Image (spheres, grey):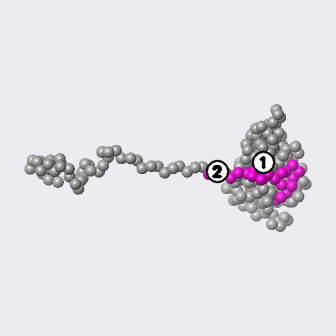
Amino acid sequence: MDSSTAPGLGSLTWVPAAERPELLAAPVAAALGALTAPAWVAEIDPDLADTAAFAEAYGVPLEVSANCVVVAARRAGQTELAVCLVPATTRADVNGLVRRHLGARKVSFAPQDVAVAESGMEYGGITPLGLPPSWPVLVDPAVAAADLVVVGSGTRGSKLAVSGAALAALPAAEVLEGLGRPVAEPPRPAPAAPAERAPDDRDVGWGERPEELSAADRRYLEDRPPHWGSD
């Protein structure tokens, strides 16, 4: 798309981010100049900032959104913070690929209060732009290749749209193959097996006469008194 034309994503009104700095967290506004392509911002309801709610409310496909996940990597008694930028349709391979790549003994999601305090951004709005320079920014190839990616703005009250290449070109960014793993669908329940019928759970004997009578049944019918009537 033409970088000078506002994106037509969902029902939102996108404007150049530099024209609405009040919609951005302070570190994000200060870092706009580090981008190699224009960034656009759209104001949203803060209660709809979470990716799934945002996509449904504003008609923005999940495929063009990316999640920025803050992780804490521990090794040799030290903790390092990093972020993983993955398509919203995937999950970051935190315990496998990320742990090995960072050379950490253990990697887990960073506590909310730590992520907020260290990034200077609101939880649910943390974005790779404007993070502390010591934080590694790991980017999934699908994000890096996207013409336009919707990410946080540092606050819950807006979203940024910027090219994937511009995010991958940030100073601390590194494209990491296999970072985002498809979200597995929950297993479907197996069909219920038909209930087994008890040996005496048959229609025969409950008001219906079997086509083939046993010898005992025939003798019973032949010997019954006349006043019993017939059926």
Q: Amino acid at mark 1?
A: Cys
Please say if 115 is above or below 127: above
| Mark 2 residue type | Ala
Residue 177 within the magenta-colored segment of the rendering:
yes
Question: In the image shown, does 64 or 203 lie closer to the viewer?
Answer: 203
Report the residue marked by disc 1.
84
At horizontal 9% and vertical 50% (from top left) the residue drawn is 226
| Point 85% across, 51% down: residue | 173
Which residue does the numbered mark 2 point to in the structure image?
184
Q: Farthest residue toward the top?
A: 77
Question: What element does badge 2 sit on?
Answer: loop
Where does the image place residue 49, in percent across and percent down from the top left? 73, 50
Q: Nearer the viewer, residue 16 or 79?
A: 79
Tell me the quarter of the picture where residue 36 sits.
bottom right
Say if mark 1 contacts mark 2, CB within 8 Å. Answer: no
Label 1 residue SS: strand
Q: Which residues are magenta?
A: 163-185
Outermost residue, front side: 215
